[in-house]
Image (spheres, rainbow, N blue to C red):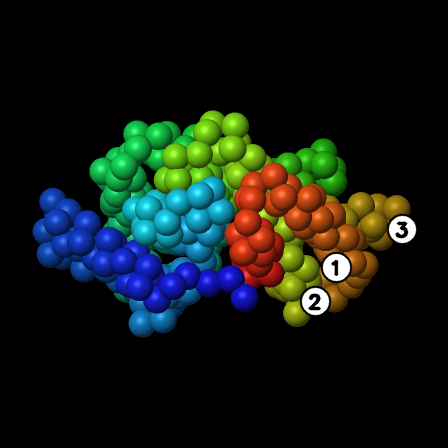
């Protein structure tokens, strides 16, 4: 099983704490930032899961550098993704602990601060300008995908390819960023960074589609994606199946997703296999190859 060493985990947490301590903000605002970073699984929680730091460190090692070299990129990725996760909840109208504790306006303002803090961490790292450029480009791709997700509906000119491309923009771009940050921290060439970015994009799509399958299997029809007919692959499949059967998907929610889990899983497995085929060109040593492959299981 791929994992980060305990010492490196401690360094990532310490990096976030140090930048947060030295940030030019007052204690009241710092408290809001700490509350966001301390939510379950996040980097300053009792049991952080390091889900965004892990691909950065694994790719840094695979690209030929020490795990410690990836610490700033890993820390920044954790901070930046907390902001995007909170924003995603708020955009979907779902309950979020930060908004419940501080109110919606203050929660939004905290997200702004986290985005700035994450970029500050990147800019002050070695090769900081390159790392920040990677994040900004990937982040813009991700929010473009999010815009498509928020403004388009399944069944309204959104086909299977469109849904997959939206997923690739939303989730694929973010893991593409994490993997490329790791390669860039190792001072890999632009060509190699691009290869790691391709791997990360497929990794992100695989991860997101696997989560979509779980939502369908475990009764996720009441989730926002289904309620708002978001252009996710499972919903597009459901709408298209209903059209072919001359049925109304909005009238029988208990039947939503019938067959879609198998379809989405097949697409996810295809992306997973494509990612696996890229690994031999990313790392020369077998341990790094196994670690890269392990990301497809862990995430």
Instruction: Give the x, y percent position of residue 89.
Output: 44, 54
Sequence order check, earlier mark of 1 and 3:
3
For mark 2, give the secondary structure.
Answer: helix
First-in-chain label (2 vs 3): 2
Q: Earlier in the sequence, mark 1 or mark 2?
A: 2
| 38 versus 180 height, above or below | below
**What is the CA distance from the residue labelled 1 to the residue labelled 3?**
18 Å
The answer to whether residue 90 is above or below residue 134 is below
Disc marking residue 261: 1
Secondary structure under badge 3?
loop
Instruction: Tell which of 6 and 82 is nearer to you.
Output: 6
Q: Which residue is mark 3?
A: 245
Extreme-top residue of the structure: 190
Q: Position of residue 285 (x, y in %)?
A: 55, 49
Q: Residue at x 66, y 69 (%)?
A: 218
Q: With 120 as the anchor, is 258 left or right in this view?
A: right
Tell me, yes or no, whether the two marked residues, 1 and 2, touch with CB atoms within 8 Å: yes
Q: Nearer the viewer, residue 289 or 164?
A: 289
Q: Residue at x 55, y 62 (%)?
A: 298
Q: Indicate which disc residue 217 carries.
A: 2
Residue mark closest to the camera, 1 vs 3: 1
Residue found farthest to the right? 245
CA distance separating discs 2 and 3: 22 Å
Residue 37 in sight in this render:
no
Q: Do we see residue 263 in this rendering?
A: yes
Provide residue 74's location: percent of width, then percent of height: 36, 50
For image coordinates 27% across by 37% down, the residue present is 126
């Amino acid at each position: 099983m791929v994992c980060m060493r305990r010492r490196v985990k401690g360094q990532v947490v310490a990096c976030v704490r140090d930048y947060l301590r030295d940030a030019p903000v007052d204690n009241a605002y710092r408290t809001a930032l700490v509350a966001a970073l301390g939510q379950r699984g996040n980097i300053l929680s009792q049991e952080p899961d390091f889900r965004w730091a892990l691909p950065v460190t694994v790719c840094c090692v695979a690209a030929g550098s020490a795990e410690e070299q990836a610490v700033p990129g890993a820390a920044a990725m954790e901070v930046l993704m907390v902001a995007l996760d909170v924003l995603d909840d708020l955009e979907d109208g779902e309950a979020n602990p930060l908004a419940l504790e501080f109110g919606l306006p203050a929660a939004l303002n905290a997200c702004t601060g986290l985005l700035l803090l994450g970029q500050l961490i990147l800019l002050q790292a070695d090769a900081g300008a390159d790392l920040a450029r990677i994040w900004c480009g990937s982040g813009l791709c991700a929010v473009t995908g999010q815009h498509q997700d928020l403004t388009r509906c399944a069944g309204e000119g959104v086909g299977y390819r469109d849904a997959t491309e939206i997923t690739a923009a939303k989730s694929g771009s973010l893991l593409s960023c994490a993997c490329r940050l790791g390669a860039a921290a190792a001072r890999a060439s632009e060509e190699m960074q691009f290869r790691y970015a391709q791997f990360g994009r497929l990794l992100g799509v695989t991860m997101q589609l696997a989560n979509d399958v779980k939502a369908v299997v475990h009764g996720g029809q009441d989730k926002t994606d289904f309620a708002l007919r978001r252009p996710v692959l499972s919903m597009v499949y459901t709408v298209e199946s209903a059209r072919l059967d001359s049925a109304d998907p909005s009238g029988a929610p208990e039947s939503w997703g019938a067959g879609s889990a198998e379809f989405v899983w097949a697409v996810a497995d295809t992306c997973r296999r494509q990612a696996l085929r890229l690994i031999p060109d990313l790392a020369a040593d077998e341990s790094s190859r196994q670690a890269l492959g392990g990301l497809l299981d862990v995430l």
